[in-house]
Each structure stands twice: as C-alpha cells, then as structure tokens.
Amino acid sequence: MAWPDWVALGGYFVVMLLIGLWSHKRVNDVSDYFTGGGRMPWWLSGISHHMSGYSAAVFVAYAAVAYSYGVTIYVWAFLPLAVATGAGAWLFAPRWNRLRRRYHVASPLEYLSRRYNVATQQALAWSGALLKVFDVAAKWASVAILLNVFTGVSLDVGILITGVVTLVYCTVGGLWADALTDLGQFVVQGVAALSMVIVTLDHTGGFLGLGSLWDRLPAGHTHPLVGPYTAGFLTAYVVVKLFEYNGGMWNLAQRYMATDSAPAAKRSAVLSAVLYLIWPAVLLFPSVVGPVLMPHIADPQQVYALLAEHLLPAGLVGLTLAGMFSHTMAMASSDANAIASVVVRDIIPAVARKGRALGARTGLLAARVCTVSFIAVSMVVAMEASHFGGPLGIITALVAAVMGPISIPMLLGLLPAFRRWGSLAALISWACGLASFVVVKYVLDGTDQTLTVATPLVTSLALYLVIGLVFPQPSAVADEITTAVSGTDAVRP
C-alpha cells in the first residue's frame, strides 16, 4: 500500500478509539454499558443492528463463494437475513424492548430463569458463550487474511492488531461505543464499497455494458441456487436466520432493547431489513464479476482484496481496507458486549453468591473484565481457525448449525402461543439438538452442508414443539411474561 492508504487506515483506527473514549462519559452503570440506558435512537439502533450482523467474512469467505459460484451467495446468504429481520420487526423486536423496560433486564438471557428455570438459563448461557468464541474467531481470521494480502503482515499479527483496537474502544465505551463506531464504520464502508463498484463497472464496460457482462460470466454464475447451495440448504438457512437475527445472536437483541420504545425497536428492525436487502448486493458485486477481470485466482478468498489493489487509486485502497475492518470490528465488539452481559448478569450470579449484588462500580469493572477476556480468547482461537474449517467452515457448519438449539427456546419463549412450554421442552430440545450436530458432523463425518445445518435445527424445533404439547408446564410467571412483552406500550421506563 502507498502512504495515503496507510494514512486512511491509521486515521480510521484513531477515530474509532476517540469514539470509544467519548462514549466512556455516557456509561455510568451496567444498564448503560449493555443496553445504552434505553436511550438509543431507532435509526442508530437499526444501522448498528445491520453492521453487527456480518463481518469481514463478506470480503473473504463469502467473496470466495461469489467468485466461484456467482449470485447464489446473495440468494442463500443475505436474502434470508432481510426476510428474517423483516419478520422479526413484528414478532420479536418490540418484545425485546418491552422485556427490558418492564423487567429491567440488561441481558437477553436474564429473563430465562423466570420464564423456564435457572438450569435452562445456564445451559443456553454457557453453550452460547462458547459458540460465540468460535464465531468471532472466524471474523478475526477473515480480516487477518485481508490484511495479509494488502500489507503482507502475518495472519497472527493481523488478528492481534484488529483485536486490540476493538478491545480498547468497546471495553471503554460499552454499547454506546459499539453503536457510534458502527455508524462511523457504515459511512466509511459505504464510500469504500461504492468506489469498488464504480471502478469495477468502469473496467467491465460501464453501466451500459451490464447486459453483456452477465453473458461473459462462467456457466451457472447467474443461477440462484447452484453447487452445494440447494433449495434444502436455503430453507434450513432461512429458518436458522429467523432465530439467529432476532435474538439468537444476543448482540442483535441488545439493539432492540436499547431503543426507548417498542415502536422504535420495530422501526429499527425494518431499517436493518431494508439494508440487508440492498447493501450486500453492492458489497458482493465486484466478487461476482471477478472472473471477468481475474479469471485465474489461486485462492478465491483473496479476490476482493486483489481487485481493490489492482483497480483502486492510492488512498482508496486504505479506505477500502478500513471498510473491510469495519464489519469485523462492528460484529466482534457487539458480540463481546453481549457475551459480557450474559456472563455478568446470568452466569456469575448463578455460580457466585457475591455476584448477585454487584454495585454500579463493581458491575462495570466485571463487565469490562469479561469483555477483555472474551476478545482475548477469541483471538487465540482465530489463530487456529484452519483446524476448524476456516472462516466459512466455522460460520456455516458450526455457527449456523448450533444456533438453532440455543435460540429456539429463547425466542419462542417470548410468544404467547408457547406460554405452556416449560423447562422440560427447552432443555431436551437444546441438548438433543446439540447432540445431533455432534453425531452428524463428527461421528458420521458428514460433509453435506444441508444435512449439517438442518439436522440440529429440525431436531431441536421438533422436540420443543412435541414435548411442549405432550408435557405442558403451565406457569403463572410464563403467562405474565408473555402477556407483558406482547401487550401495549403504556408502561414507560
């Protein structure tokens, strides 16, 4: 990279750190740290929800699929996000907000001890926290690959650089720092991505040449579903994302909890859904048409970085790299905040009596220590990402597959239709869903992506539904919670 690129990249990191320091002044207790004190504007929450939903894996793992298979990457990887988030705007987003306002919770899992029991809360908390270590590790590994292509630094050094900068600003400023840096990252990434689209079009015949451009792509490149990405895989992926993007990814539930009202949370979800419908197409366009410009790339994971290096002028290359960093830092920082909220509000009180009565200062200290610990552990795992199938292997085969069993009891437990479903249905569906993943992936050594993703989801969902119907566990508390989060918005904070 030329010196203007280093200036752009360095300036980006400095701005992120300054935002974190400014946000520090807005954090007085764990409510501010984990849910922004319920004062976040809906538009900021919506942009933050969107930016926290995907990472530099878009420019590495997903870009590789776009280069190799074409537009199917948009069909199976991002349309489901728009559909899931749009549906959640009515089903789940307002309920998360009412849950915070009416029960004063600061963690998405905090209500589970009352809705089911402590055992259910702890099972979901521990397994979900472990899963997130691998999920965020995949993001660090992705951005390290990009940094390696642009600058030549080793993967381990790239992981350390990104992780340390993220650690500083999100630990100091909490959710406010996450959301405000998400906004800044959205602007930076927007300029960079549009620049990439413009130069890509310029080198492939311009806007008027789009019609003939599709004819120059490899056979099957414009097919909606191709290769391992079948209709069955798409169906399973849509259902997984319905749970994952409406609260199964705890950091996304926090965005809805952070707004000041249920209608604001709903508007936040609608904005995020619209962005998922439009923006990924912009991000992935250069990789989809990559075979026309660079037909013989040895490692497709490097396609976006190589295109940027060859097509963009000095200065914009650094800005593009900053844009790629932005998604990873947005997702990783929000995940770290969510994990810390679960550890401080759910796990510590259950395992240590002193943890049930943490003061404002002690609670903040515990939150920051947990944030640092989570990021540090995920960075260590990222350095061994190749042992887990690389970034895409972790994201599709591990995170997507295991997310269903963890999120199904949590999300369905908010809905009045499932108010008679108790801890028996929740725990059995969770345990058997995870066990089915282990059997398919490691005992049977399954390689079929559809089977790997669908089996845990179908197992968990079917068992939750059947056990709840056959062995209902009616509870006055469950009735109260599901009614409260589904009602009117007359109750204010």
Image (cartoon, grey):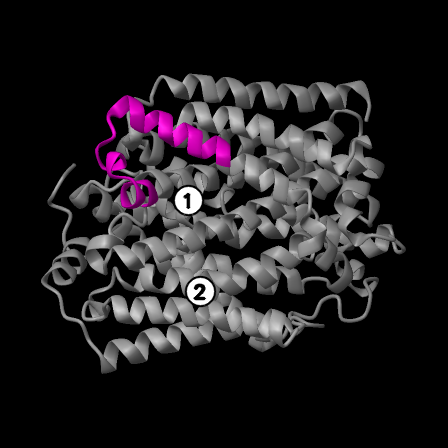
Numbered tag placed on residue 455 in the rendering? none
Q: Assess whether residue 142 is covered by the magenta stretch.
A: no
Q: In the rendered view, tell whether residue 60 sits above or below residue 123.
A: above
Residue sitting at 41 percent across and 68 percent down? 431
Closer to us: 452 or 305? 452
Residue 318 image position (x, y, % from top left): 72, 28
Residue depicted at x 82% and y 32%: 152
- Residue at the extreme right: 296
Q: Which residues are magenta?
A: 347-373
> What residue appears at the point 11 percent right and 43 percent down from the top-left corner?
491
Give the residue type at disc 2.
Gly
Q: Secondary structure at mark 2?
A: helix
Left or right: residue 226 compared with residue 313: left
Residue 259, percent from left and from top: 29, 39
Q: Amino acid at mark 1?
A: Asn
Give the mark nearer the N terminus: 1 vs 2: 1
Q: Are marks 1 and 2 in contact (CB under 8 Å)?
A: no
State the image coordinates of residue 247 (x, y, percent, origin top left).
38, 53
- Counting other residues with Cα less than 10 Å from the Cα at mark 1, is it few (<14), some (14-19), or many (20 or more)? many
Q: How many numbered marks, from 0 up?
A: 2
Q: Which residue lies under the disc numbered 2?
A: 404
Secondary structure category for the residue under label 1:
helix
Specify whether residue 121 is in view.
yes
- Residue 251's label in the rendered image is 1
